[in-house]
Image: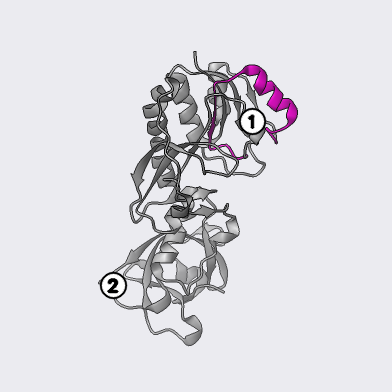
Amino acid sequence: MTRAVVFAYHNVGVRCLKTLLAGGVHVALVFTHQDRPGEHIWFDRVSAVSADHGIPTLTPEDPNRPEIVQHIHELAPDFLFSFYYRRMLSPELLAIAPRGALNLHGSLLPKYRGRAPVNWAVLHGEAETGATLHYMTVKPDAGDIVAQTAVPILPDDTAREVFDKVTVAAEITLHGVLPALVNGVASRTPQNLGQGSYFPGRKPEDGRIDWHWPALRIHNLVRAVAPPYPGAFTTVAGQPARILRTRVLVNSPLPPTPSLPRERKFALAEISGRLIAQCAGGEVLQILALDIAGQPAFPGQLTDRLGPGPWRLGD
């Protein structure tokens, strides 16, 4: 029986671990992460799947410690698998499994190597992304590709919606190629990294809206960081606000926003029962979900909360 040690986290980790088990792979040990204090846990836990199947599970801060490497050596796995695990694995770990160490990455490699690939793809307005199974090397997300599956990104999809699609794509990718991996006949395609891109992790402060940007760029930021991520933030009439869902209005039949004083170049107005943000170049966004000072804000209520509009956007 094929034997594996698995490093896994998040929904992709859950679905891919279940795929290995359904495919008859003996998972000798699972590594996952402890929940971070204060982190919003909106995803499924790998540890719950391990417990259901009686698989020993470890949550070390650093899986590359010598005693852990030695323990994995003693388990003699055929494969190592990494499914959305947050730590890089050392060369000593990668060398243990004679049939390879493989990672499931949430993009169509070589595009969007690195951290937060789904969020970056949405932020950049991509029309598709996907999941890629590839061999791990010391350089992140750079090894030979075994298989990948594409999914569409619709114009108003949030990162969460795209991530759900990528999770399914990850399961489909692994399920489809697992028999070939087990039988030693899976193909390997080297990556041309020059045709790809690498991106770092994202921080909550990266969600600040710059109203000098075009409407589409702001819309892409909003959906890239929409809940369960921290959200895109700004100020409305000087109060802290998060803009959580938007739609770009093109050739809109709505009347134009009222003439604004120079100091209100970027403003939010209520027009025909809708909240409309005026952006750079006269472009407009409809604001579909908004909170101000931590409370939901709706058309028809802002005048009572903020005084007469239009309301200044940004500092």
The one of 55 and 289 positioned closer to us in this rendering:
55
Amino acid found under the numbered disc labelled 2: Leu
Q: In this orientation, does residue 34 appear?
A: no
The residue drawn where x is 55% and y is 25% is 48
83 inside magenta stretch: yes
Q: In this orientation, does residue 188 appear?
A: yes
In the rendered image, the vertical position of residue 32 relative to residue 117, given as above or below:
above
The residue drawn where x is 45% and y is 45% is 191
Residue 223 at x, y = what percent? 43, 56
The one of 234 and 181 positioned closer to us in this rendering:
181
Number of marks present in the image shown = 2
Amino acid found under the numbered disc labelled 1: Leu
120 inside magenta stretch: no
Residue 199 at x, y = what percent? 53, 54
Residue 298 at x, y = what percent? 43, 62
Which element type, helix, strand or loop, lies under badge 2? loop
Q: Residue furthest bottom?
A: 262
Q: Mark 1 highlights which residue?
A: 93
Instruction: Look at the image and give the residue range highlighted in magenta.
Output: 62-87
